[in-house]
């Protein structure tokens, strides 16, 4: 039988993802310090280290059988995958934020112009949120440092992901409302989940050892 192909996300979720797979009894040799290596063949398991935003693509198109991925990436991509286990770690929240000194200026802009300009790295999540509340928005797609957008007049508000709110506070931004909570998820390719019992078995093993996500107010890393 061929190895079960598993995608792991680079970045903030990576270390906890490797630790969880190791706790579940998988051979994770070499994953603790991957350097520039992106693929690890461990016999029964084959690991692929990919960008977090690309994980749903690898899973949905069958490049891998299963993966660990943040709910934020799943929601933004909106691709067909099987969400199997909430792994509990990597807890964070999508929020709408604006300058602390803004007052009601965003609403005033909206009443006057009929549209609100919002900067974000997550245009799909942002558009769905504003559609749900019936607000017309012009989305400014950015790739980083979106906190600067309202501070220099490029946008009235931002939609971003945060764990503690420290980055927002450091840039004199305040949360207007929360949009979506996110934690790491174990996901499977729809066909692999249905036809390969190893995917469902791994989901069961992970479910048995996951730690519940932090509740609101718990300390986390931003």
Image (cartoon, grey):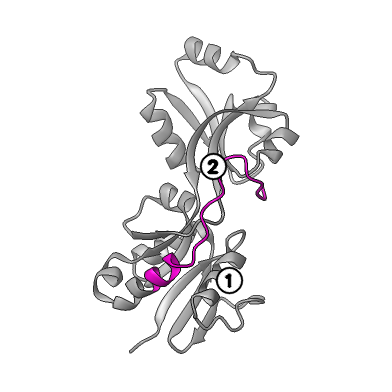
Q: Is residue 157 left or right of residue 179?
A: right
Of labels 1 and 2, earlier in sequence is 1
Please indicate, yes or no, whether residue 87 appears anywhere in the rendered image.
Answer: yes
Q: Is residue 221 left or right of residue 72?
A: right
Q: Position of residue 7 (x, y in %)?
A: 47, 70
Does residue 193 appear left or right of residue 39 in this picture? left
Q: Secondary structure at mark 1?
A: helix
Residue tagged 2: 93
The quadrant in which the N terminus is found is bottom left
Residue at (37, 29) in percent of width and height: 131
> CA separation, marks 1 and 2?
23 Å
Q: Which residues, given as a range, are shown in magenta? A: 202-222
Q: Which residue is mark 1?
A: 19
Identify the main secondary structure in magenta: loop
In the rendered image of this protein, does residue 191 appear above or below residue 138? Answer: below
Q: Nearer the viewer, mark 1 or mark 2?
A: 1
Residue 135 location (% of width, % of height): 42, 22
* Residue at the (38%, 69%) spot, across then down: 204
Whether residue 220 is in magenta: the answer is yes
Quadrant hosting residue 37: bottom right
Q: Residue at x 35, y 74 (%)?
A: 201
How far from the left and from the top, in percent, is residue 220? 65, 49
Q: Is residue 154 visible?
A: no
Q: Residues within 10 Å of mark 1 (few under 14, many from 20)?
A: some
Q: Secondary structure at mark 2?
A: strand
Label 2 Cα neighbours within 10 Å, binned few <14 / some 14-19 / many ≥20 = some
Q: Is residue 80 above or below residue 59?
A: above
Tags 1 and 2 in contact by the CB under 8 Å rule? no
Q: Quadrant of residue 81?
A: bottom left
């Amino acid at each position: 039988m061929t190895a079960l192909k598993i995608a792991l996300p680079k970045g903030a979720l990576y270390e906890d993802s490797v630790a969880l797979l190791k706790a579940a009894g998988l051979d994770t040799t070499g994953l603790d310090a991957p350097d520039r290596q992106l693929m690890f063949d461990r016999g029964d398991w084959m690991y692929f280290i990919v960008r977090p935003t690309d994980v749903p693509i690898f899973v949905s198109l069958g490049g891998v059988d299963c993966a660990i991925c943040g709910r934020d990436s799943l929601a933004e991509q909106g691709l067909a995958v099987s969400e199997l286990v909430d792994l509990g770690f990597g807890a964070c929240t999508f929020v709408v934020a604006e300058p602390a000194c803004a007052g009601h200026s965003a609403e005033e802009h909206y009443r006057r112009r009929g549209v609100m300009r919002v900067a974000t790295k997550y245009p799909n999540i942002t558009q769905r949120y504003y559609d749900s509340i019936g607000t017309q928005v012009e989305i400014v797609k950015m790739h980083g440092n979106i906190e600067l957008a309202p501070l220099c007049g490029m946008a009235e508000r931002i939609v971003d992901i945060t764990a503690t709110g420290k980055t927002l506070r450091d840039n004199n931004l305040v949360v207007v409302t929360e949009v979506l909570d996110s934690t790491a998820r174990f996901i499977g390719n729809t066909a692999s989940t249905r036809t390969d019992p190893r995917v469902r078995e791994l989901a069961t093993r992970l479910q048995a050892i996951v730690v519940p996500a932090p509740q609101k107010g718990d300390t986390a890393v931003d």
